[in-house]
Amino acid sequence: MSGLLAALPVHFLRPYWLLCLLALPLLAWWWRARAQPRSAWQDAVDPHLLPHLLVAAEGSPRARLARGSGMLAAALAVIAMAGPSVGKAEHPLWQAKAPLVVALDLSSSILARDLPPSRLAQARAKIATLLRERAGGQVALVAFADDAYTVAPLTEDAANVALFLDALAPDVMPADGHRGDRAIAWSQRLLRNAGFAQGDVLLLTDRADGQAIAEAARARAAGYRVSALGLGTAGGGAFDTPGGLGNARLDAASLQRLAASGGGRYQPLAAGNHDLRALDVLDPQDAGAAAAGGGTSRRWRDDGAWLLPFALLFALPLFRRGGAAMAMLLLVLWLPMPPAQAQDASGLWRRADQQAHARMLEGVAAYRRQQYEEAIAKFTGNASAEGQYNLGNALAQAGRYDQAIAAYDRALQQRPGMPDAVANRAAVDAARKRKPPPGGQSQQGPQQGGDQQRDQGQQRDAQQSRQPGRPQGDPSRQPGQGSQDKTADPRQQQQADAAQRQRMQDALRKQGQSQVPGQPRPQPAETPEQRERRIANQAQLQRVPDDPGALLRAKFQLEHQRRQGLGQ
Protein backbone atom coordinates (compact mmCIF):
# COMPACT_ATOMS: atom_id res chain seq x y z
CA MET A 1 0.00 0.00 0.00
CA SER A 2 2.86 2.36 0.79
CA GLY A 3 4.33 1.82 -2.68
CA LEU A 4 1.02 2.69 -4.33
CA LEU A 5 0.57 5.84 -2.25
CA ALA A 6 4.15 6.93 -2.94
CA ALA A 7 3.21 7.53 -6.57
CA LEU A 8 0.43 9.96 -5.61
CA PRO A 9 1.14 13.71 -5.41
CA VAL A 10 -0.49 13.74 -1.97
CA HIS A 11 1.16 12.39 1.17
CA PHE A 12 -1.12 10.70 3.72
CA LEU A 13 -0.20 10.91 7.39
CA ARG A 14 -2.63 8.12 8.37
CA PRO A 15 -2.95 6.05 5.19
CA TYR A 16 -4.74 3.05 6.75
CA TRP A 17 -7.89 5.13 7.10
CA LEU A 18 -8.20 4.78 3.32
CA LEU A 19 -9.18 1.14 3.83
CA CYS A 20 -12.55 2.46 5.01
CA LEU A 21 -13.26 3.44 1.38
CA LEU A 22 -13.75 -0.25 0.68
CA ALA A 23 -16.79 -0.20 2.97
CA LEU A 24 -18.57 2.55 1.02
CA PRO A 25 -20.01 0.17 -1.65
CA LEU A 26 -21.48 -1.95 1.16
CA LEU A 27 -22.98 1.19 2.66
CA ALA A 28 -24.53 2.14 -0.66
CA TRP A 29 -25.98 -1.35 -1.08
CA TRP A 30 -27.49 -1.22 2.44
CA TRP A 31 -28.94 2.20 1.75
CA ARG A 32 -30.61 1.02 -1.46
CA ALA A 33 -31.88 -2.16 0.18
CA ARG A 34 -33.72 -0.28 2.89
CA ALA A 35 -35.94 1.53 0.33
CA GLN A 36 -39.35 2.13 1.79
CA PRO A 37 -42.42 0.46 0.27
CA ARG A 38 -45.18 2.44 -1.40
CA SER A 39 -46.65 4.83 1.15
CA ALA A 40 -50.38 4.76 1.93
CA TRP A 41 -50.39 8.55 1.75
CA GLN A 42 -49.97 8.40 -2.01
CA ASP A 43 -53.59 7.29 -2.32
CA ALA A 44 -54.93 9.91 0.10
CA VAL A 45 -52.92 13.07 -0.78
CA ASP A 46 -52.97 15.10 -3.93
CA PRO A 47 -49.99 14.37 -6.20
CA HIS A 48 -48.79 18.00 -6.20
CA LEU A 49 -48.49 17.91 -2.36
CA LEU A 50 -46.65 14.59 -2.06
CA PRO A 51 -43.16 15.95 -2.85
CA HIS A 52 -43.50 18.33 0.09
CA LEU A 53 -44.81 15.72 2.57
CA LEU A 54 -43.05 12.47 1.76
CA VAL A 55 -39.44 11.40 1.29
CA ALA A 56 -38.72 10.93 -2.37
CA ALA A 57 -39.06 7.44 -3.71
CA GLU A 58 -35.89 5.39 -3.91
CA GLY A 59 -35.72 5.50 -7.66
CA SER A 60 -36.52 9.19 -8.01
CA PRO A 61 -33.88 11.71 -9.10
CA ARG A 62 -33.96 13.36 -5.66
CA ALA A 63 -33.26 10.04 -3.91
CA ARG A 64 -30.43 9.22 -6.28
CA LEU A 65 -28.96 12.70 -5.70
CA ALA A 66 -29.15 12.30 -1.91
CA ARG A 67 -27.56 8.84 -2.06
CA GLY A 68 -24.74 9.94 -4.34
CA SER A 69 -24.12 13.12 -2.39
CA GLY A 70 -24.01 11.15 0.87
CA MET A 71 -21.52 8.67 -0.55
CA LEU A 72 -19.30 11.51 -1.72
CA ALA A 73 -19.49 13.18 1.71
CA ALA A 74 -18.52 9.89 3.37
CA ALA A 75 -15.58 9.47 1.00
CA LEU A 76 -14.36 13.01 1.74
CA ALA A 77 -14.66 12.33 5.48
CA VAL A 78 -12.57 9.16 5.18
CA ILE A 79 -9.92 10.94 3.11
CA ALA A 80 -9.79 13.74 5.69
CA MET A 81 -9.21 11.19 8.45
CA ALA A 82 -6.32 9.74 6.43
CA GLY A 83 -4.47 13.03 6.88
CA PRO A 84 -3.78 14.24 3.34
CA SER A 85 -0.81 16.60 3.03
CA VAL A 86 0.45 18.48 0.01
CA GLY A 87 3.45 20.18 1.62
CA LYS A 88 5.68 20.56 4.64
CA ALA A 89 5.80 23.24 7.32
CA GLU A 90 8.49 24.48 9.69
CA HIS A 91 8.21 23.25 13.27
CA PRO A 92 10.41 24.25 16.20
CA LEU A 93 12.74 21.46 17.24
CA TRP A 94 12.88 20.72 20.94
CA GLN A 95 15.93 18.76 22.05
CA ALA A 96 16.29 17.18 25.46
CA LYS A 97 19.78 17.24 26.90
CA ALA A 98 20.97 13.72 27.60
CA PRO A 99 21.80 13.24 31.31
CA LEU A 100 25.28 12.19 32.39
CA VAL A 101 26.49 10.24 35.43
CA VAL A 102 30.22 10.59 36.15
CA ALA A 103 31.61 7.62 38.11
CA LEU A 104 35.04 8.25 39.64
CA ASP A 105 37.32 5.42 40.76
CA LEU A 106 38.34 6.17 44.38
CA SER A 107 40.22 2.96 45.01
CA SER A 108 43.72 3.24 46.44
CA SER A 109 45.19 3.20 42.90
CA ILE A 110 43.84 6.72 42.34
CA LEU A 111 46.79 7.95 44.45
CA ALA A 112 49.33 6.73 41.89
CA ARG A 113 51.70 9.47 40.78
CA ASP A 114 52.16 8.56 37.11
CA LEU A 115 49.98 11.60 36.30
CA PRO A 116 51.68 14.34 38.32
CA PRO A 117 50.94 15.41 40.93
CA SER A 118 48.59 12.41 41.21
CA ARG A 119 45.79 10.71 39.37
CA LEU A 120 43.32 12.05 41.92
CA ALA A 121 44.32 15.67 41.33
CA GLN A 122 44.12 15.21 37.55
CA ALA A 123 40.72 13.50 37.83
CA ARG A 124 39.34 16.32 40.00
CA ALA A 125 40.55 18.92 37.51
CA LYS A 126 39.07 17.00 34.57
CA ILE A 127 35.66 16.66 36.23
CA ALA A 128 35.75 20.38 37.07
CA THR A 129 36.41 21.14 33.40
CA LEU A 130 33.56 18.86 32.39
CA LEU A 131 31.12 20.53 34.76
CA ARG A 132 32.23 24.01 33.69
CA GLU A 133 32.12 23.49 29.91
CA ARG A 134 29.20 21.08 29.54
CA ALA A 135 26.37 22.73 27.59
CA GLY A 136 23.41 21.92 29.80
CA GLY A 137 21.84 18.66 30.77
CA GLN A 138 21.60 17.02 34.19
CA VAL A 139 24.78 15.68 35.78
CA ALA A 140 25.36 13.32 38.72
CA LEU A 141 28.56 12.27 40.46
CA VAL A 142 29.22 8.75 41.76
CA ALA A 143 32.27 7.47 43.65
CA PHE A 144 33.17 3.79 43.67
CA ALA A 145 35.72 1.42 45.14
CA ASP A 146 34.45 -1.86 46.58
CA ASP A 147 30.95 -0.42 46.08
CA ALA A 148 29.38 2.65 44.44
CA TYR A 149 27.83 5.61 46.27
CA THR A 150 26.09 8.80 45.17
CA VAL A 151 28.12 11.94 45.80
CA ALA A 152 25.61 14.25 44.09
CA PRO A 153 22.33 13.18 42.45
CA LEU A 154 21.21 14.27 39.00
CA THR A 155 20.86 18.03 38.86
CA GLU A 156 20.95 20.89 36.38
CA ASP A 157 23.19 22.86 38.74
CA ALA A 158 26.70 21.71 37.80
CA ALA A 159 28.22 24.16 40.29
CA ASN A 160 26.51 22.25 43.10
CA VAL A 161 28.21 19.05 41.97
CA ALA A 162 31.60 20.78 41.81
CA LEU A 163 31.38 21.62 45.53
CA PHE A 164 32.19 17.99 46.40
CA LEU A 165 35.30 17.60 44.24
CA ASP A 166 37.85 18.66 46.86
CA ALA A 167 36.39 16.16 49.35
CA LEU A 168 36.88 13.15 47.05
CA ALA A 169 39.65 10.86 48.24
CA PRO A 170 40.06 7.13 48.91
CA ASP A 171 39.71 7.64 52.67
CA VAL A 172 36.01 8.58 52.33
CA MET A 173 35.18 5.13 50.98
CA PRO A 174 34.07 2.47 53.51
CA ALA A 175 36.16 -0.27 51.87
CA ASP A 176 38.85 -0.45 49.22
CA GLY A 177 38.31 -2.34 46.00
CA HIS A 178 37.66 -1.92 42.30
CA ARG A 179 34.06 -2.78 41.35
CA GLY A 180 33.41 -0.97 38.12
CA ASP A 181 30.38 -3.18 37.51
CA ARG A 182 28.69 -1.82 40.62
CA ALA A 183 29.47 1.74 39.52
CA ILE A 184 27.77 1.13 36.17
CA ALA A 185 24.76 -0.56 37.78
CA TRP A 186 24.38 2.23 40.36
CA SER A 187 24.68 4.93 37.67
CA GLN A 188 22.06 3.17 35.59
CA ARG A 189 19.78 3.08 38.64
CA LEU A 190 20.15 6.84 39.14
CA LEU A 191 19.15 7.49 35.54
CA ARG A 192 16.22 5.10 35.67
CA ASN A 193 14.88 6.47 38.96
CA ALA A 194 15.06 9.99 37.53
CA GLY A 195 12.80 8.90 34.66
CA PHE A 196 15.40 8.85 31.88
CA ALA A 197 15.12 6.05 29.35
CA GLN A 198 18.44 7.13 27.80
CA GLY A 199 21.61 8.68 29.17
CA ASP A 200 25.39 8.51 29.43
CA VAL A 201 27.66 6.94 32.03
CA LEU A 202 31.31 8.03 32.10
CA LEU A 203 33.80 5.97 34.12
CA LEU A 204 37.09 7.55 35.20
CA THR A 205 39.30 4.59 36.03
CA ASP A 206 42.44 2.72 34.93
CA ARG A 207 41.07 -0.73 34.10
CA ALA A 208 37.95 -2.84 33.64
CA ASP A 209 37.37 -6.49 34.45
CA GLY A 210 34.97 -8.97 32.92
CA GLN A 211 32.15 -8.10 35.31
CA ALA A 212 32.33 -4.41 34.40
CA ILE A 213 32.33 -5.21 30.68
CA ALA A 214 29.29 -7.46 31.07
CA GLU A 215 27.47 -4.80 33.11
CA ALA A 216 28.22 -2.23 30.39
CA ALA A 217 26.55 -4.53 27.87
CA ARG A 218 23.46 -4.78 30.06
CA ALA A 219 23.35 -1.01 30.42
CA ARG A 220 23.54 -0.63 26.65
CA ALA A 221 20.65 -3.06 26.21
CA ALA A 222 18.64 -0.92 28.65
CA GLY A 223 19.27 2.22 26.57
CA TYR A 224 22.27 3.75 28.41
CA ARG A 225 25.66 4.46 26.85
CA VAL A 226 28.82 3.68 28.83
CA SER A 227 32.12 5.46 28.04
CA ALA A 228 35.49 5.41 29.77
CA LEU A 229 38.21 8.00 30.44
CA GLY A 230 41.52 6.30 31.20
CA LEU A 231 43.51 7.42 34.25
CA GLY A 232 47.25 6.75 34.34
CA THR A 233 49.94 5.64 31.95
CA ALA A 234 51.03 2.31 30.55
CA GLY A 235 54.19 2.46 32.66
CA GLY A 236 52.13 2.88 35.82
CA GLY A 237 52.83 4.70 39.03
CA ALA A 238 53.48 3.86 42.67
CA PHE A 239 51.03 4.37 45.50
CA ASP A 240 50.88 3.48 49.18
CA THR A 241 48.83 0.52 50.38
CA PRO A 242 48.34 -0.98 53.86
CA GLY A 243 50.58 -3.84 52.78
CA GLY A 244 53.30 -1.70 51.31
CA LEU A 245 54.01 0.05 48.03
CA GLY A 246 51.80 -0.76 45.05
CA ASN A 247 51.93 -0.03 41.35
CA ALA A 248 48.96 0.73 39.08
CA ARG A 249 49.06 0.72 35.28
CA LEU A 250 46.57 1.94 32.72
CA ASP A 251 44.92 -1.00 30.95
CA ALA A 252 43.69 0.78 27.85
CA ALA A 253 42.65 -2.42 26.09
CA SER A 254 40.17 -3.42 28.81
CA LEU A 255 38.66 0.08 28.85
CA GLN A 256 38.27 -0.03 25.07
CA ARG A 257 36.39 -3.31 25.39
CA LEU A 258 34.20 -1.80 28.09
CA ALA A 259 33.35 1.20 25.91
CA ALA A 260 32.64 -1.02 22.91
CA SER A 261 30.40 -3.24 25.02
CA GLY A 262 28.57 -0.22 26.41
CA GLY A 263 28.10 1.48 23.06
CA GLY A 264 30.29 4.41 24.10
CA ARG A 265 33.80 5.70 23.50
CA TYR A 266 37.19 5.51 25.17
CA GLN A 267 39.78 8.24 25.57
CA PRO A 268 42.87 8.49 27.77
CA LEU A 269 43.02 11.50 30.05
CA ALA A 270 44.91 14.35 28.40
CA ALA A 271 45.52 18.05 28.86
CA GLY A 272 42.83 20.43 27.65
CA ASN A 273 39.31 19.33 26.81
CA HIS A 274 39.72 17.53 23.50
CA ASP A 275 39.44 14.18 25.29
CA LEU A 276 36.04 15.23 26.68
CA ARG A 277 34.93 16.41 23.25
CA ALA A 278 35.98 13.10 21.75
CA LEU A 279 33.84 11.36 24.35
CA ASP A 280 30.88 13.57 23.27
CA VAL A 281 29.96 14.62 26.81
CA LEU A 282 30.39 18.39 26.51
CA ASP A 283 27.55 18.96 24.02
CA PRO A 284 24.74 16.61 25.07
CA GLN A 285 21.94 16.01 22.59
CA ASP A 286 18.84 13.89 22.54
CA ALA A 287 19.52 10.72 20.57
CA GLY A 288 16.03 10.92 19.07
CA ALA A 289 16.33 14.51 17.81
CA ALA A 290 15.69 14.94 14.12
CA ALA A 291 18.27 17.64 13.53
CA ALA A 292 20.99 18.03 16.10
CA GLY A 293 22.23 21.40 14.98
CA GLY A 294 19.06 23.27 13.97
CA GLY A 295 16.28 24.95 15.77
CA THR A 296 13.47 23.89 13.40
CA SER A 297 12.49 20.90 11.30
CA ARG A 298 10.21 20.45 8.27
CA ARG A 299 7.29 18.11 8.79
CA TRP A 300 4.26 17.15 6.74
CA ARG A 301 1.27 19.25 7.69
CA ASP A 302 -2.24 17.85 8.03
CA ASP A 303 -4.46 19.41 5.31
CA GLY A 304 -7.48 17.20 5.94
CA ALA A 305 -9.37 20.01 7.63
CA TRP A 306 -9.79 21.78 4.28
CA LEU A 307 -12.09 18.94 3.15
CA LEU A 308 -14.62 19.74 5.89
CA PRO A 309 -16.60 22.42 4.03
CA PHE A 310 -16.98 20.16 1.01
CA ALA A 311 -18.02 17.17 3.12
CA LEU A 312 -20.68 19.30 4.85
CA LEU A 313 -21.86 20.68 1.53
CA PHE A 314 -22.41 17.24 0.05
CA ALA A 315 -24.08 16.07 3.27
CA LEU A 316 -26.83 18.72 3.07
CA PRO A 317 -29.24 16.54 1.03
CA LEU A 318 -29.15 13.97 3.82
CA PHE A 319 -30.80 16.25 6.35
CA ARG A 320 -34.25 14.88 5.64
CA ARG A 321 -36.22 12.20 7.35
CA GLY A 322 -34.33 8.95 6.96
CA GLY A 323 -31.00 10.66 6.35
CA ALA A 324 -30.24 11.71 9.92
CA ALA A 325 -28.45 8.43 10.69
CA MET A 326 -26.20 8.84 7.67
CA ALA A 327 -25.43 12.44 8.63
CA MET A 328 -24.47 11.42 12.15
CA LEU A 329 -22.21 8.69 10.76
CA LEU A 330 -20.41 11.22 8.56
CA LEU A 331 -20.02 13.60 11.48
CA VAL A 332 -18.47 10.88 13.66
CA LEU A 333 -16.11 9.85 10.87
CA TRP A 334 -14.90 13.38 10.28
CA LEU A 335 -14.45 14.58 13.84
CA PRO A 336 -10.85 14.08 15.01
CA MET A 337 -9.95 12.59 18.34
CA PRO A 338 -10.32 15.27 21.04
CA PRO A 339 -7.07 16.30 22.72
CA ALA A 340 -6.41 15.31 26.28
CA GLN A 341 -7.70 17.97 28.59
CA ALA A 342 -6.16 19.06 31.85
CA GLN A 343 -7.68 17.97 35.10
CA ASP A 344 -10.62 20.16 35.97
CA ALA A 345 -10.60 22.19 39.13
CA SER A 346 -13.72 20.49 40.47
CA GLY A 347 -11.89 17.19 40.82
CA LEU A 348 -14.44 15.25 38.73
CA TRP A 349 -11.70 13.66 36.63
CA ARG A 350 -9.08 13.35 39.34
CA ARG A 351 -7.73 10.00 40.45
CA ALA A 352 -8.19 8.87 44.03
CA ASP A 353 -4.59 9.75 44.95
CA GLN A 354 -4.99 13.22 43.41
CA GLN A 355 -8.17 13.82 45.39
CA ALA A 356 -6.45 12.71 48.59
CA HIS A 357 -3.54 15.05 47.90
CA ALA A 358 -5.93 17.94 47.27
CA ARG A 359 -7.70 17.27 50.58
CA MET A 360 -4.32 17.17 52.31
CA LEU A 361 -3.44 20.61 50.95
CA GLU A 362 -6.83 21.96 51.99
CA GLY A 363 -6.30 20.58 55.48
CA VAL A 364 -2.86 22.18 55.73
CA ALA A 365 -4.35 25.51 54.67
CA ALA A 366 -7.06 25.21 57.32
CA TYR A 367 -4.43 24.32 59.92
CA ARG A 368 -2.47 27.46 59.08
CA ARG A 369 -5.64 29.51 59.51
CA GLN A 370 -6.03 27.86 62.94
CA GLN A 371 -9.32 26.34 61.82
CA TYR A 372 -8.54 23.01 63.44
CA GLU A 373 -11.95 21.40 63.17
CA GLU A 374 -11.95 21.95 59.42
CA ALA A 375 -8.41 20.58 59.25
CA ILE A 376 -9.51 17.48 61.19
CA ALA A 377 -12.32 16.92 58.70
CA LYS A 378 -9.90 17.19 55.78
CA PHE A 379 -7.25 14.89 57.28
CA THR A 380 -9.78 12.28 58.41
CA GLY A 381 -9.89 9.40 55.99
CA ASN A 382 -6.28 9.79 54.82
CA ALA A 383 -4.70 6.52 55.95
CA SER A 384 -1.15 7.42 54.93
CA ALA A 385 1.55 8.14 57.50
CA GLU A 386 1.56 11.83 56.60
CA GLY A 387 -2.23 12.02 56.76
CA GLN A 388 -2.43 10.44 60.22
CA TYR A 389 0.46 12.59 61.42
CA ASN A 390 -1.30 15.76 60.27
CA LEU A 391 -4.54 14.52 61.81
CA GLY A 392 -2.75 14.08 65.12
CA ASN A 393 -1.43 17.64 64.95
CA ALA A 394 -4.89 19.08 64.29
CA LEU A 395 -6.47 16.99 67.05
CA ALA A 396 -3.80 18.11 69.50
CA GLN A 397 -4.37 21.77 68.62
CA ALA A 398 -8.08 21.21 69.24
CA GLY A 399 -7.29 19.79 72.69
CA ARG A 400 -8.34 16.22 71.83
CA TYR A 401 -5.15 14.63 73.15
CA ASP A 402 -6.25 10.98 73.34
CA GLN A 403 -7.37 10.98 69.73
CA ALA A 404 -4.19 12.79 68.71
CA ILE A 405 -1.99 10.14 70.34
CA ALA A 406 -3.98 7.42 68.57
CA ALA A 407 -3.40 9.18 65.25
CA TYR A 408 0.34 9.43 65.95
CA ASP A 409 0.41 5.71 66.77
CA ARG A 410 -1.21 4.89 63.42
CA ALA A 411 1.39 7.04 61.64
CA LEU A 412 4.21 5.27 63.49
CA GLN A 413 2.79 1.87 62.58
CA GLN A 414 3.18 2.73 58.93
CA ARG A 415 6.50 4.53 59.30
CA PRO A 416 8.34 3.37 62.44
CA GLY A 417 10.72 5.91 63.90
CA MET A 418 9.13 8.91 62.17
CA PRO A 419 11.01 11.68 64.06
CA ASP A 420 8.30 14.34 64.04
CA ALA A 421 5.59 11.89 65.04
CA VAL A 422 7.72 10.55 67.91
CA ALA A 423 8.50 14.06 69.19
CA ASN A 424 4.92 15.32 68.91
CA ARG A 425 3.45 12.22 70.52
CA ALA A 426 5.73 12.69 73.52
CA ALA A 427 4.80 16.39 73.72
CA VAL A 428 1.07 15.68 73.52
CA ASP A 429 1.35 12.87 76.07
CA ALA A 430 3.14 15.26 78.46
CA ALA A 431 0.46 17.90 77.89
CA ARG A 432 -2.26 15.34 78.57
CA LYS A 433 -0.68 14.39 81.90
CA ARG A 434 -0.50 18.00 83.04
CA LYS A 435 -3.47 19.39 84.96
CA PRO A 436 -5.86 21.01 82.47
CA PRO A 437 -6.21 24.79 82.88
CA PRO A 438 -9.38 26.29 84.39
CA GLY A 439 -12.07 27.48 82.02
CA GLY A 440 -11.40 24.74 79.48
CA GLN A 441 -8.56 26.61 77.77
CA SER A 442 -6.66 24.33 75.43
CA GLN A 443 -2.92 24.02 75.38
CA GLN A 444 -0.65 24.64 72.47
CA GLY A 445 -0.11 21.70 70.16
CA PRO A 446 2.59 20.08 68.10
CA GLN A 447 4.31 20.88 64.90
CA GLN A 448 2.47 20.89 61.65
CA GLY A 449 2.72 17.98 59.17
CA GLY A 450 2.71 19.38 55.63
CA ASP A 451 3.32 22.69 57.39
CA GLN A 452 5.02 20.92 60.36
CA GLN A 453 5.64 23.34 63.17
CA ARG A 454 6.96 22.21 66.56
CA ASP A 455 4.72 21.63 69.53
CA GLN A 456 4.57 24.80 71.59
CA GLY A 457 3.11 22.99 74.60
CA GLN A 458 6.51 22.19 76.08
CA GLN A 459 7.69 25.75 75.55
CA ARG A 460 4.66 27.47 77.10
CA ASP A 461 5.76 27.24 80.73
CA ALA A 462 9.17 28.70 79.88
CA GLN A 463 7.57 31.50 77.87
CA GLN A 464 5.10 32.28 80.67
CA SER A 465 7.95 32.48 83.18
CA ARG A 466 9.37 35.40 81.20
CA GLN A 467 6.08 37.28 80.97
CA PRO A 468 5.71 40.37 83.21
CA GLY A 469 3.82 39.58 86.40
CA ARG A 470 4.66 35.86 86.36
CA PRO A 471 7.80 34.84 88.27
CA GLN A 472 9.87 31.78 87.49
CA GLY A 473 9.43 28.72 89.58
CA ASP A 474 6.13 29.72 91.15
CA PRO A 475 4.41 26.33 91.57
CA SER A 476 1.27 27.80 93.13
CA ARG A 477 0.14 29.24 89.77
CA GLN A 478 -1.18 27.01 87.00
CA PRO A 479 -0.81 27.95 83.31
CA GLY A 480 -3.80 29.90 82.11
CA GLN A 481 -4.67 31.49 85.42
CA GLY A 482 -4.94 35.25 85.84
CA SER A 483 -2.11 37.13 87.51
CA GLN A 484 -4.21 38.11 90.54
CA ASP A 485 -7.61 37.53 92.07
CA LYS A 486 -10.06 40.00 90.56
CA THR A 487 -11.67 40.56 93.98
CA ALA A 488 -8.39 41.67 95.63
CA ASP A 489 -7.62 45.29 96.53
CA PRO A 490 -6.06 47.20 93.57
CA ARG A 491 -3.24 48.55 95.74
CA GLN A 492 -2.35 45.05 96.90
CA GLN A 493 -2.37 43.84 93.30
CA GLN A 494 0.09 46.55 92.28
CA GLN A 495 2.39 45.69 95.16
CA ALA A 496 2.23 41.98 94.33
CA ASP A 497 2.94 42.67 90.65
CA ALA A 498 5.95 44.83 91.56
CA ALA A 499 7.30 42.10 93.85
CA GLN A 500 6.84 39.51 91.12
CA ARG A 501 8.67 41.63 88.56
CA GLN A 502 11.53 42.13 90.97
CA ARG A 503 11.82 38.38 91.62
CA MET A 504 11.74 37.70 87.89
CA GLN A 505 14.52 40.23 87.24
CA ASP A 506 16.66 38.79 90.02
CA ALA A 507 16.23 35.28 88.61
CA LEU A 508 17.13 36.44 85.10
CA ARG A 509 20.22 38.24 86.33
CA LYS A 510 21.37 35.08 88.06
CA GLN A 511 21.08 33.26 84.73
CA GLY A 512 22.96 36.01 82.90
CA GLN A 513 19.91 36.85 80.77
CA SER A 514 18.79 40.40 81.32
CA GLN A 515 15.20 40.92 80.26
CA VAL A 516 14.78 44.42 81.75
CA PRO A 517 13.91 46.85 78.95
CA GLY A 518 16.44 49.62 78.51
CA GLN A 519 19.19 47.93 80.55
CA PRO A 520 22.23 46.27 78.89
CA ARG A 521 23.07 42.62 79.47
CA PRO A 522 25.51 42.40 82.39
CA GLN A 523 28.90 40.95 81.45
CA PRO A 524 30.48 38.61 83.99
CA ALA A 525 33.84 39.63 85.34
CA GLU A 526 36.79 37.74 83.78
CA THR A 527 39.95 37.04 85.70
CA PRO A 528 43.35 37.11 83.93
CA GLU A 529 43.53 33.30 84.21
CA GLN A 530 40.10 32.90 82.59
CA ARG A 531 41.02 35.30 79.79
CA GLU A 532 44.27 33.41 79.12
CA ARG A 533 42.40 30.08 79.05
CA ARG A 534 39.78 31.50 76.64
CA ILE A 535 42.44 32.80 74.24
CA ALA A 536 44.26 29.44 74.36
CA ASN A 537 41.03 27.58 73.57
CA GLN A 538 40.30 29.81 70.60
CA ALA A 539 43.83 29.30 69.26
CA GLN A 540 43.46 25.54 69.68
CA LEU A 541 40.19 25.56 67.76
CA GLN A 542 41.80 27.54 64.94
CA ARG A 543 44.54 24.92 64.65
CA VAL A 544 42.00 22.12 64.10
CA PRO A 545 42.20 21.28 60.37
CA ASP A 546 39.02 21.32 58.29
CA ASP A 547 37.83 17.95 57.02
CA PRO A 548 35.60 18.56 54.00
CA GLY A 549 35.29 14.82 53.43
CA ALA A 550 33.79 14.10 56.84
CA LEU A 551 30.24 14.46 55.52
CA LEU A 552 30.85 12.12 52.59
CA ARG A 553 32.71 9.67 54.82
CA ALA A 554 29.82 9.48 57.27
CA LYS A 555 27.25 9.31 54.49
CA PHE A 556 29.02 6.45 52.69
CA GLN A 557 29.61 4.57 55.94
CA LEU A 558 25.92 4.70 56.85
CA GLU A 559 24.93 3.58 53.36
CA HIS A 560 27.49 0.76 53.55
CA GLN A 561 26.06 -0.44 56.86
CA ARG A 562 22.52 -0.24 55.50
CA ARG A 563 23.42 -2.35 52.48
CA GLN A 564 25.15 -4.92 54.66
CA GLY A 565 22.05 -5.11 56.82
CA LEU A 566 19.92 -5.72 53.75
CA GLY A 567 22.32 -8.34 52.45
CA GLN A 568 23.16 -6.39 49.31
Image: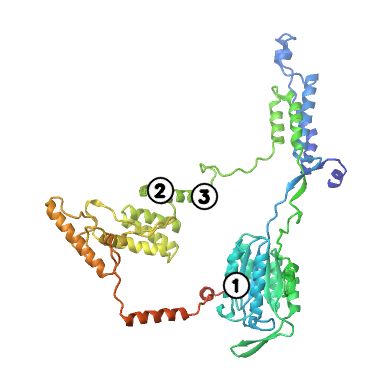
Could you tell me the amino acid type at mark 1?
Leu
Question: As shown in the figure, which amino acid type bears the numbered disc 2?
Answer: Ala
Label 3, label 2: how far apart the Cα atoms are = 18 Å
Q: Give the residue at x 24% y 58%.
A: 468
Residue at 65%, 81% (x, y): give it: 118
The answer to which of marks 2 and 1 sits earlier in the sequence is 1
Q: In which quarter of the view is residue 36 placed?
A: top right
Kindly report the distance in space between the C-alpha atoms of the residues bearing marks 2 and 1: 45 Å
**Residue 502 % position (x, y):** 20, 63
| Quadrant of the snapshot with the N terminus | top right
Q: Which residue is mark 1?
A: 165
Q: Residues within 10 Å of mark 3 (few under 14, many from 20)?
A: few
**Residue 405 lies in quadrant:** bottom left
Q: Nearer the viewer, residue 404 or 538?
A: 538
Q: Where residue 287 sits in the image (x, y, percent)?
A: 73, 59
**Label 3 residue SS:** helix
Q: Is residue 248 above or below residue 409?
A: below
The residue singled out by tag 2 in the image is 366
Q: Secondary structure at mark 2?
A: helix
Q: Is 515 located above or below residue 91 in the figure?
A: below
Which residue is located at x 69 percent, y 35 percent? 332
Lower sequence index among marks 3 and 1:
1
In the visual, does 56 lie left or right of 183?
Answer: right
Instruction: Locate the C terminus by quadrant.
Output: bottom right
The location of residue 515, given as percent across then percent down, is 28, 62
Residue depth check, mark 2 versus mark 1: number of the one nearer the observer: 1
Figure colour scheme = rainbow
